[in-house]
Image (cartoon, rainbow, N blue to C red):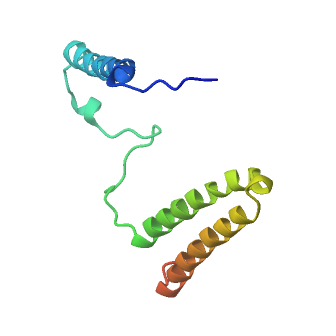
Amino acid sequence: MVLEVPSSSMDYLPIVLMFLVAVGFVVFVMLVTHLLGPKHKSKIKLDVFECGIEAQGNARVPFSVKYFLVAILFVLFDVEVIFMYPWAVNFRALKGVGFFEMMTFMGFMLVGFYYIIKKGALKWE
């Protein structure tokens, strides 16, 4: 028989201390590197450098919002697919209830996908 011991705020003290030490270390290292690091700036040091190729033109070329929209939608649906892996692993243990819950989840996901298609978010001109 296992006795359950009520938890107190003292049980969280090691976690709080570890968090404080980690934050303190980050602040300490950032301050030390800022104070001890080189401070001289020159035109060559501040010049744009990318893969050894000389910069040409303006980097502020406007992009279509469609690129960002497709990227956000990809991330959204990719994260939703990640939730299917634990379900697939425990499919037999979850039985009918798990199947119904996954079909509900897939239904919501398909409603969102249908909404995206109807709004024309994936159409390119």
Name of the residue lying farthest toward the bottom: 118
Q: Nearer the viewer, residue 103 or 1?
A: 1
Q: Position of residue 82 (x, y in %)?
A: 62, 54
Q: Position of residue 94 (x, y in %)?
A: 73, 56
Q: Quadrant of residue 88?
A: bottom right
Name of the residue lying farthest toward the front: 1
Q: Nearer the viewer, residue 89 or 11?
A: 11
Q: Is residue 11 left or right of residue 116?
A: left
Looking at the rendered image, the quarter that the N terminus falls into is: top right
Q: Position of residue 53 (x, y in %)?
A: 44, 42
Identify the residue at horizontal 24%, vertical 14% (top origin).
32
Name of the residue lying farthest toward the right: 92
Identify the residue at horizontal 66%, vertical 66% (top origin).
102
Identify the residue at horizontal 45%, vertical 37% (top origin).
52
Counting labels gives 0
Q: Is residue 70 left or right of residue 78?
A: left
Q: Quadrant of residue 2?
A: top right
Answer above or below: position of 67 versus 79. below
Q: Nearer the viewer, residue 29 or 21?
A: 21
* Residue 98 visible (yes or no): yes
Answer above or below: position of 77 versus 92. below
* Residue 64 visible (yes or no): no
